Image: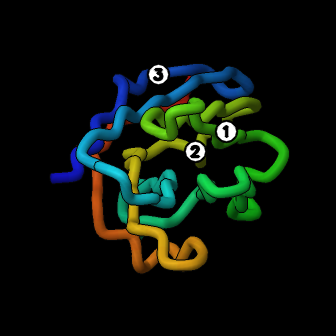
Amino acid sequence: AVQLVESEGGSVQPGGSLRLSCTASGFSNSTYCMAWFRQAPGKEREGVADIDPMDGSTTYTDSVKGRFTISQDNAKTTLYLQMGSLKREDTGMYYCAAVLRYGRCPPYHVYNYWGQGTQVTVSS
């Protein structure tokens, strides 16, 4: 079974940086797209960034472009999210997610494997 385990999040001041990681297991020989989601208090969960393991291509939601970077290790079993220039509105629960890749990485709403989530708080 696919399992995703996020690293501990943290609390950081506005303008600061933080890196999240997610360790995946159970992928066997299949190829999985991976992504980061977040859910702010009182809001719906949103996709933040995803990465296609076949070519390393990435996409980002507009609010994090230029500030966040998603990446993977060579084994494609550890996912990272480097967050910089953090803002208060980046506060929320961050989730690692995965989905089996069929031809290309699907839209965010198709992701069906989830980590337990890790809290990121941006506050002075």
Query: Quarter of the image holding residue 88?
Result: top right
Decide: is 44 above or below 57.
below
Q: Which mark is residue 90?
A: 2
Q: Quadrant of residue 73?
A: top right
Q: List the residue tagged with mark 3.
A: 11
Q: Find the distance from the CA under tag 1 to the CA under tag 2.
A: 5 Å
Q: Is residue 64 above or below residue 87?
A: below
107 versus 1 height, above or below: below
Q: In terms of image quadrants, where is residue 124?
A: top right
* Circles 1 and 2: CB atoms closer than 8 Å: yes
Write down the residue under mark 1. Answer: 87
Which is nearer the N-term, disc 2 or disc 3?
Answer: 3
Give residue 123's position: percent from left, percent from top. 54, 28
**Which residue type carries mark 3?**
Ser
Image location of residue 24, percent across then percent down: 34, 39
Q: Residue 90 vs residue 2: left or right?
A: right
Q: Residue at x 57, y 78 (%)?
A: 103
Dot 2: within a 10 Å radius of its alpha carbon, few (fewer than 14), some, or many (20 or more) residues?
A: many
Instruction: Specify which label sits upstream in the sequence, 1 or 3.
Output: 3
Residue 67 drawn above or below residue 9: below
- The x, y position of residue 108, in whole percent, is 50, 73
Q: Secondary structure at mark 3?
A: strand
Which residue type does callout 1 highlight? Answer: Lys
Measure how far apart labels 2 and 3 are at the Cα level: 11 Å
Instruction: Mark yes or no: residue 49 visible.
Output: no
At 60% from the left edge and 57% from the top edge, which residue is drawn?
A: 50
